[in-house]
Amino acid sequence: MRSGRPWGALKGDDRARHDLARYLRGLVDHSGLTLKVIGRRCGCSDTTVSKQLAGEHLPRWEFVEAVVEACTSDERHWPDRKRAVRELWQRAVHPRRPDPPPAEPGLVDAHTRLVRAQAETIATQRRLIEVTDELSLARRQLLESVQVEHRSSQVIAVLQVVLLRLSALISNLTAERDRRLSEATGYRAELAQARRKLSDAERERGRARNQLGQAREERERASALTELLHDRIGRLEDRLRQLGVGSPDPGAGDVVAPGPNPSTADEILLDTSAGLDRLQRLLDEHGDELAELESATSAQEAPRDPLSGLLDDLASEGFGPHEADADEGADRAEGTWQLVAEHIRGRFDANRVVLRLRADSQAPMCTLVAGEPLPSRMRRDDPRRLREDALLRFAGAEVRRFRVADADGEVAEALARRDAREVLVVPLRGATQLLGAVEVHDRLDRGGHGFRKAHLAALRDLAGRLAIVADNRRLLARLRHDAYRDPLTGLLNRPGFREAASEPMRAAATAVVVRVDLDVLSAVSDALGQAWGNRMVVAAGRRLRDELGPEVPLARLEGGAFAALLLDRQAERVKEVAERLHTSLSRPYPVDRLTIEAGVVIGWASTRDCEADDPDADALLQRADVAVRATSEGDPLRAYAPSMGQIFLRRFQLVTQFRSALESGQVSVHYQPKVALPSRQVIGAEALVRWRHPEFGRVDPDEFVPAVEATGLVDVLTDFVLDRALERVRRWVDRGLRMSIAVNLSVRTLADEEFPDRVGAALRRHGVPPELLTFELTESGVMADPERALPVLRRLHAMGVVLAVDDFGTGYSSLAYLRQLPVDEVKIDKSFVLGMGTDLGDMAVVRSIVELGHSLGLTVVAEGVEDDAARDQLVSMGCDVAQGYLISRPVPDEDLEEWLRARTVQVERNGTMRVVLREWG
């Protein structure tokens, strides 16, 4: 207030005093201000204001003038109201004197009429002022009601649209959940079946190895026995040849040579007979073993079964993560299946074999024909026609035989379409679904007997083997796809991109990895649901594929992040590609009858600019991510430079050294005083953290605080600042000074449910009243997660801690949010305060915030006050508190005490010691 004297009361005329009090109460009711706000502006308590407005005593003129000034927001009404209240106050101060001695009757009557006329004039003026104020109030109320009605209709319409979308979203999510559950059940069954088949195959492989070992041992024994027999027979023949037994004499013609000595011949015969008898016994003893060994040896030396080899080739075929690898694998598999069909036709001596296969439950049926081609009416793989075909309606897994002689109706028609007399059909069933079918048409035998039971049994066994191979191949393809592909877009995932890029990067002279990020997906998912966000991702992937072409490896890394590999491109060409991608992805996306524009940032890294030797895909991806982080709103395309890595390395060093910096005293707390307007009373200060690094020097808080928040060390920082601030308040309280300290809160701190307990423990530990502690929070920090932040704020407010909204006007500022938040103060952002002298818009914003805050009973603080002109404007607007360089820069704790001694003086008011600024800086 303009006077430093306490408010007193004067005696005066009762009627005039009550008229003055009634008039002042009318102004207070019309302004909508609370007694607390009026008391703050008048420099007294709300109890004193209530007593003065009751009319029991006549207040001093300074109080009356201050009330009128506080309640008058429109400067045009100020002269009239001041004149009227001056007349009422003068009448109350100077009551009517006793009547003078009787005068002449005519003169008395004239004087009486004049006094009455003056009184009526004053009453009329007072009534006119009241009517004018009531009319202004009615106009404002009417305007507010119209605005409220319009906003209500808009809110109702928006809520109706949101409800419709929510119902549709719930239905879609329910259907998606059921589908995923059914797919998961099927995958589990397929996985169990594959595991059982794998274990069976391992057992069969073990048995085969044992049989092969036994066969090798038998073969070695047979070889040894054969060599023994050959050696024995050779020796017998040599002895017979030496003795000349049975050998004709050459040149003797028909004359028989004389016989040998009988005794020697008998010995030879006996010896030969004994050898033959022994050989015969050996043959009789080991004949079965030799026969079995001969069959095993012939089986080993016989050529491999062609069908088994083909099936093994199908089971072992695979393809990599790239699209070309998949196409090549599919073509190779189709050729192998065609050879299988040819082998089946040869084995069954059939006129035609039709092999129908389906790689996936959603894929169409593929038909392969061996032998005579199908008639033209059967060559199209029409899904509807195949479902209606009588021969392909499978009820089980057995082989069925259809003959023209036994067929009628639909079966006869199906045979006629195939131009076949006899058909064997067997389904190929996997663990959970039908994989295809095998058709064998018309056996080519001269006797015309057709297919026999043995053929049916052989076809059933063969179909089982084909089904196992097809099912295993399908499962392996699914596993490979899931391992290398993104399930949403069908593009490569991060491991698939790494595999697809490794070989081309080694072969190319220059490789460039381009990273693309969309930054609107979270907002779309929150507003419309995850399904619509996924549709945007799919649409973005298609646009990227259309721009880059099918031969470029393209991957979806996560969320709205994509990566592409460009080979042997110049820097200018890479930038042209990035500009094309940015233009394509920036086009609006149609989403549920809406068009959404997505922000796109692109960064890329080349092997030429990479510091590492022989960098791989991961190294380029990491550097492309650094380039993306270096983009800005005005520069959404950035190429990686080695200096960017130094920036992030510095950030990493700051984060890792932060805790030790707290312990070693590198981090300190500075204070910036806050002064009440216009009384110049120092009411407290704001605590600001500062870091002087031994290597980097003074580190700006805007650089290290976000990094600390991202790494989860913000609680350590908050507790450090809170302890230092409460220590400072405790020292003030010990000196009889009631000045508060404001501490900034982070988004992560507002989400910590245990934070109010830590604050309460700190207040008790330092013995500081809670009203001397202020927490400043940003609107964006609260509205980032209001469901978790609001309960924490309510608990702090219930403890008595003062809450202030920092940077008011730059975030989610609205009357609805302010009414919802349990705050006591609002701080006008310094950008508006600094611009008041040159921008009328900023001045209007500041004035509106001041009026809005006062109408809600909040204290308004202006930060960024740097000159006398801004201070005077804030005083004229009724701003409560100022903070800025005009008062003081942020100073360390010891410098703050020096500033208080040099720039302030302590004054006792109403029994309380107050610190008042001597003069403005």
Image (cartoon, rainbow, N blue to C red):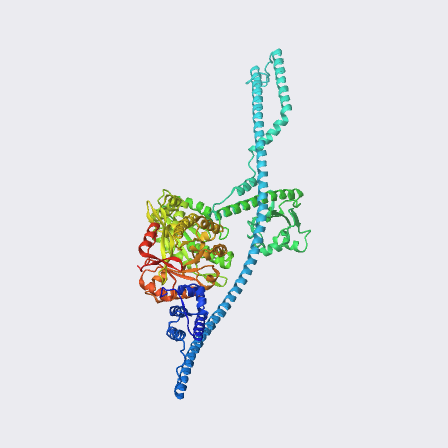
Q: Which residue lies furthest to the front in this view?
A: 101
Residue 281 appearing in the image: yes
Q: Nearer the viewer, residue 695 or 601?
A: 695
| Viewer-side residue, 717 vs 492 | 717
Note whether 766 is above or below 594 in the view shown: above
Image quadrant holding the C terminus, namely bottom left
How far across and down, in percent of the image, does residue 772 sit? Answer: 42, 55
216 to the left or right of 522: right
Q: Give the quadrant of residue 310.
A: top right
Vertical relation: 563 (above or below) 18: above
Quarter the N terminus occupies: bottom left
Q: Name which residue lies at 64% across and 55% down.
A: 413
Q: Nearer the viewer, residue 135 or 238?
A: 135
- Residue 51: x and y in percent read 45, 67
Is any atom of residue 507 visible in this view? no
* Left or right, residue 23 beside residue 893: right
Q: Which residue lies furthest to the right in this view?
A: 406
Residue 128, image x, y percentages = 43, 78
Residue 624 percent location from the top left of the image = 39, 49
Q: How many numbered marks are there?
A: 0
